[in-house]
Amino acid sequence: MGQSASVHVYSPGGSTPTSSHCRCITANQPDAVSSTDVNAQLTLPIFGDEQDYTSEIPDECLALIFQSLSSGDRKSCSLVSKRWLLVEGQSRHRLSLNATADIYSQIPAIFSRFDSVTKLALRCDRKSSSINDDALALISLRCRNLTRLKLRGCRQVTDLGMAFIAKNCKVLKKFSCGSCTFGAEGMNALLDHCSSLEELSVKRLRGVNDGVVAAPIGPGAAASSLKSICLKELYNGLSFGPLIIGSKNLRTLKLLRCLGDWDRLLETVANREENNLVEIHLERLQLSDIGLTAISKCSHLEILHLVKALDCTNAGVVAVAEHCKLLRKLHIDGWRSNRIGDEGLIAIAKNSANLQEFVLIGLNPSSVSMSAIAANCKKLERLALCGSETIGDAEISYIAEKCVALRKLCIKGCHVSDQGIEAFAWGCPNLVKIKVKKCREVTSEVADWLRARRRSLTVSLDVEETEVETVEVSASDAGEQDDGAEYPSNVNRMTNAGGGVNSDALSSNNAGRSSAFKSRIGFFGGRSLVACAFGRWLNGNGSSNAVL
C-alpha cells in the first residue's frame, strides 16, 4: 500500500456531505460513485435508519483501506459520510495543488481537511498568476510537518516566502523548485534552517539567473545532511559551488545544461578528504579532461553519465576507467564528435569488471573495442548502441556470442541487418528484451522469426515506421532525423494529435509520391504487421504512435 495512491488535486468549491448516513444516489447522477460493476440505472443500496456496519471498522483500518485506493475512489469514499470524509482527509499524506492566486482564500479549508500532509506539490501554469508570499506563509503555518515540497511555476514567490518555509518547515528532507523567481537569499534561508534536508533539485531558478554576479549559496545547516544535488538549466550555476563543496556527505551530483567552467569546481570537490560521491551526471557542460581526471579520484563512483561534453576525449575516459573500479552504470554520448573512441572504450573493457549497464550514443567504435567490451564485461546486463556508423552485423554477432549475462539490448540508428539480429536466436541466453529502432535493413520477418524461436523474448521493432520514412525521405529533401525523436518525424507529421490523417501533410508532394507509395504497400502486402499499421493510421487510431 504505497503512497502513490493518495495523490489528490484539490478543487475549491467541491461538494461535501451533510449527513452521517449514506445518501440514496443513482449511478447516473453527477456525484455518483463510479463503478464498472454497477448498471447506469441501478440504484445504490442505502442504510437509511438501518445499522451502519462500517462504523465497527476502526479509523486506523479505514485509513489503511483508503491508502490502497486510487485518488478518484478516495474522493468518492469521502462523500459517503462525515466520518469517512474526516478519516480520508486525515490519512492523506500527499497532496498536489493548482497553485493559482485565487486559491488563497481556500487554504484554511483545504488544510483543515488535509491536516496530515507531509508531501506537497504546488504547481502553476505559465498563463496564470501563482500564489504569493502571503499564501506560502499561510501554507507553511498549516504544514509544519512537511518532509517534501515541490514548487513549479510559482513566479510570485520571493525570498520572503522562502524564508517563511524555512522557518516553519524545518523537517524538510526533499525540496524541488522549477521556473521560480526567488533568489540566493531565499535558497540560503532554506539551507540555513532545514538541517534535515537530504535532496535538493533546482531548475531554471530565475532569481539566481538575474544579474551578472550571483550571491554564493552555501550549505548552511544542511552541510551534513545533503546527499543529492541536482542543478538544471541555470545561468549562474556556479553560484551553487560553495554548496556542492561544503556538502560533506554528498553522494549524488547532477549538473545539467548549466553555464560556467566546471573543471575547477570538480577538482575542488574531488580533492576533499571526505569524498563519498557515488553517482555523477554531467550533461552539456563546459567540461574537459581536467574535470574527468578530477572525477577519477572518486574511488566510490558507481554511476557516471557523460552527455555531450565536446571537450572530453579518450584521455579523460581512460583516467576514469583506470581509477573508478566500482563502475556499474556508464552512459556516454559523444555527440558524433569522434573525440572518444577505441582507446577509451578498451580501457573501460579492461578495468570495469562490475559494469552492468552501458549506453553508447554518437560514438563510432571499431570491432576491436566492441569485442573487448563483450569479452571482458561479464556482468553486463543492459546495453544500448545508438547512432553509430561503425557498428554492424559483425559487432552485434560478437555481442550475441559473448555477452552471456545480457538481459536487455537496444540498437538504434546502426548499420545492422537481419543477419545480425538472427544471432540472438542462439546467443545471449538470458536476454528478455531486444529493441531495434531506425535500422532500415532489419525487417519484420526476422522479428517474427526471432519471436518464434524464443517465445520468452520480447522483440520490439519499428520496421513499419522505418519503411514509411524511407518513402517520405526518398521523395523529398528531408534531412537527417534527430536522434532524440521517439519516432521518425515524417511519420509524426502524417498523423495529428488525435491519430487521424493530417491532410496538410499528405497533400504536400502527394502526386510525386503516389505511385511509389502504392507500389511499396503492394510489395509489403504479405506482411501482416505493416498492413495492420497502415490500417490503424487510415482508421484514425492513435495507438500506432504509442511507445513500443
Image (cartoon, helix red, strand yellow):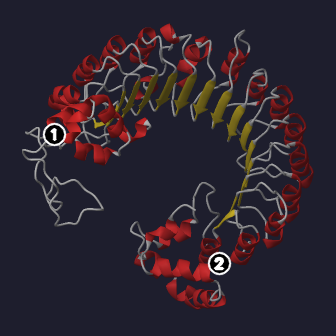
Q: Position of residue 408 (x, y in %)?
A: 71, 53
Of labels 1 and 2, earlier in sequence is 1
Residue at 32% x, 42% y is: 126
- Compared to 91, does 454 lie above or below? below
- Compared to 218, does 303 lie above or below? below
Alpha carbon of mark 1 to alpha carbon of mark 2: how far?
66 Å
Element assignment for label 2: helix
Q: In which quarter of the image is residue 491?
A: bottom right
Mark on residue 7? none
- Pick whichever, 492 or 22, lies toward us: 22
Q: Is residue 517 visible?
A: yes
Residue at 60% x, 54% y is: 484
Q: How many labels does the image show?
A: 2
Neighbour class for label 1 at 10 Å: few (<14), some, many (≥20)? some
Q: Which amino acid does label 1 sit on?
A: Ser
Q: Left or right: 265 with respect to 162?
A: right
Q: Mark 2 points at which residue?
A: 474
Q: Which amino acid does label 2 sit on?
A: Ser
Q: Position of residue 221 (x, y in %)?
A: 49, 8
Viewer-side label of 1, 2: 1
Q: Quadrant of residue 66?
A: top left
Element assignment for label 1: loop
Q: In which quarter of the image is residue 15?
A: top left
- Pick whichever, 294 or 225, lies toward us: 225
Q: Looking at the rendering, in which quadrant would you find the C terminus?
A: bottom right
- Compared to 438, does 384 lie above or below? above
Q: Mark 1 points at which residue?
A: 81
Q: Left or right: 136 with respect to 295?
A: left
Q: Position of residue 315 (x, y in %)?
A: 85, 33
Q: Left or right: 359 with respect to 479?
A: right
Q: Where is residue 295 in the image (x, y as percent from the top left)?
A: 74, 24
- Pick whichever, 41 or 457, lies toward us: 41
